[in-house]
Image (spheres, rainbow, N blue to C red):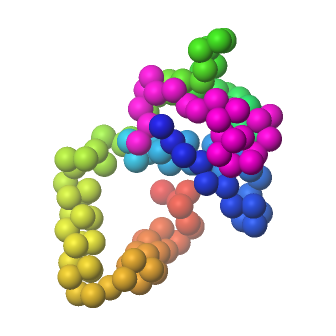
Amino acid sequence: MVVFRIDRRSGVATYLQIVRQVEQALRMGALEEGDRLPTAAQVAAETKVNPNTTLKAYRELERAGLAEVRQGAGTFITRSLVPPQSGPDSPLRTSLAEWLNEARAQGLSGPEVDALFRSAFAAVYPGGADAG
């Protein structure tokens, strides 16, 4: 199950934060087809977000074809966003894990690795995360 983290200072609408976190969980394989999302009441209890905000996010996910609402049963994931080349046994993921282990072995902290990755990412994808 996904646990939502809401950043009220981010400037990003709360419902979009929920949508993006579900999409990210789908890309990472943390959510898979058939998984049930937490109810709006559960999300409200955990994050202090209005249940209607969660319902709006779930409607957006449904519109995007990523989830479906089953009356009386909940909201369920309908498809994955895991690219075939990024699964747990993929060569790219293995290489990335090796790189991260090497960075740790050389004494880099998490924030230093993050900064290094973001710098390299920006050099390869100058348009940002949506650039292809």
99 relative to 54 in the view: left or right: left
User: Which residue is rendered at x = 41% and y = 32% of the image?
Assistant: 32
Where residue 88 sits: x, y (%)?
25, 47
2 relative to 90 in the view: left or right: right
The answer to whether residue 57 is seen in the rendering is no
Whether residue 32 appears in magenta in the rendering, the answer is yes
Residue 121 position by quadrant = bottom left
Whether residue 110 appears in magenta in the rendering, the answer is no
123 to 57, vertically: above or below:
below
14 relative to 26 in the view: left or right: right
Give the magenta range: 30-52
User: Which residue is rendered at x = 51% and y = 42% of the image?
Assistant: 2
> Which residue in the rendered view is the most extreme toward the top?
71
Q: Nearer the viewer, residue 121 or 57?
A: 57
Where residue 48 sits: x, y (%)?
74, 48
Q: Nearer the viewer, residue 83 or 100?
A: 100
Where residue 101 sits: x, y (%)?
22, 73
